[in-house]
Amino acid sequence: MPPIPADPTVVHPMPDQPRVVLLKPLVTSPLITVGEFTYYDDPEDPTAFENRNVLYHYGPERLVIGKFCALGEGVRFIMNGANHRMDGPSTFPFPIMGGSWADHFDLITGLPGRGDTTVGNDVWFGYGTTVMPGVHIGHGSIIASGSVVVDDVPDYGIVGGNPARLLRHRYSHADIDRLLALAWWDWPLPHLTEHIPTIMSGTVDDLEAAAPSPSPH
């Protein structure tokens, strides 16, 4: 009997650990996309991730998170709606206070942004990470606990600090190219299931040997 894949549609993949949720089944906003098996861990209310952990998200910028990402407690994405004007003497958003001040709402709408915030596949976010607007985080990267990510993170990079800086790459540039070409996160789920040990603890050579054969044309 072939191995049985895990179910990407359940909210609680570990029934005895309600603090762990898969995010894809929970997301309702059209501005947020999350890939299969990406999870969030929080002892308070992990099911409220969309409102508690994605902040100032008024659009049109989107948050796109790939598959197989691990988000530790307190990971937050600050979106472009948090921006204030910085080209005048004051950064205070007077129009949101109401009264006749609201007549000047055009002064705080349409502020320039950095575009969508995107996270690749197989990214590990440590406890209390903050991601600023418009950042691109590459596949296979690791974000150290407490980091404030203000710039793009390369594929298979390890970053940490405030602001987060590149500490090192997990693999050589040649091996990173091989890993990106293999893209194990896109393998058919039954095939992926058969090769979990290789994906978790094998070498890049092992992963290449385990890759599914290309479909005949």
Image: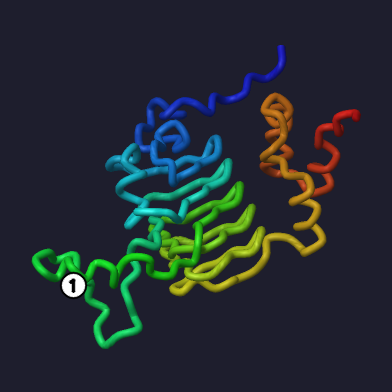
| Residue 84 drawn at (x, y percent) | 31, 72
Near-viewer residue (23 or 18): 23
Q: Is residue 83 above or below residue 184?
A: below
Residue name at image x 47 percent, y 52 percent:
62
Residue name at image x 40 percent, y 25 percent:
15
Q: What is the residue that sits farthest to the top in this orientation? A: 1
| Residue 123 drawn at (x, y percent) | 57, 51
Q: In the image, is 128 to the left or to the right of 189?
A: left
Q: Is residue 95 above or below residue 142?
A: below
State the image quarter where residue 49 is shown: top left
Q: Which quarter of the rendering shows the N terminus?
A: top right
Q: What is the residue that sits farthest to the left in this orientation? A: 99
Q: Amino acid at mark 1?
A: Phe
Near-viewer residue (82 or 37): 82
Q: What is the residue that sits farthest to the front in this orientation? A: 103
Q: In the image, is 194 to the left or to the right of 69?
A: right
Near-viewer residue (14 or 191): 191
State the image quarter where residue 47 is shown: top left
Q: Is residue 67 above or below residue 169?
A: above
Circle 1: element type: helix
Residue of label 1: 94
Q: Which quarter of the rendering shows the C terminus?
A: top right
Q: In the image, is 52 to the left or to the right of 4?
A: left
| Residue 114 drawn at (x, y percent) | 49, 66
Label 1: how many residues lie within 10 Å, few (<14), some (14-19) or many (20+)? some
Residue name at image x 70 percent, y 44 percent:
201
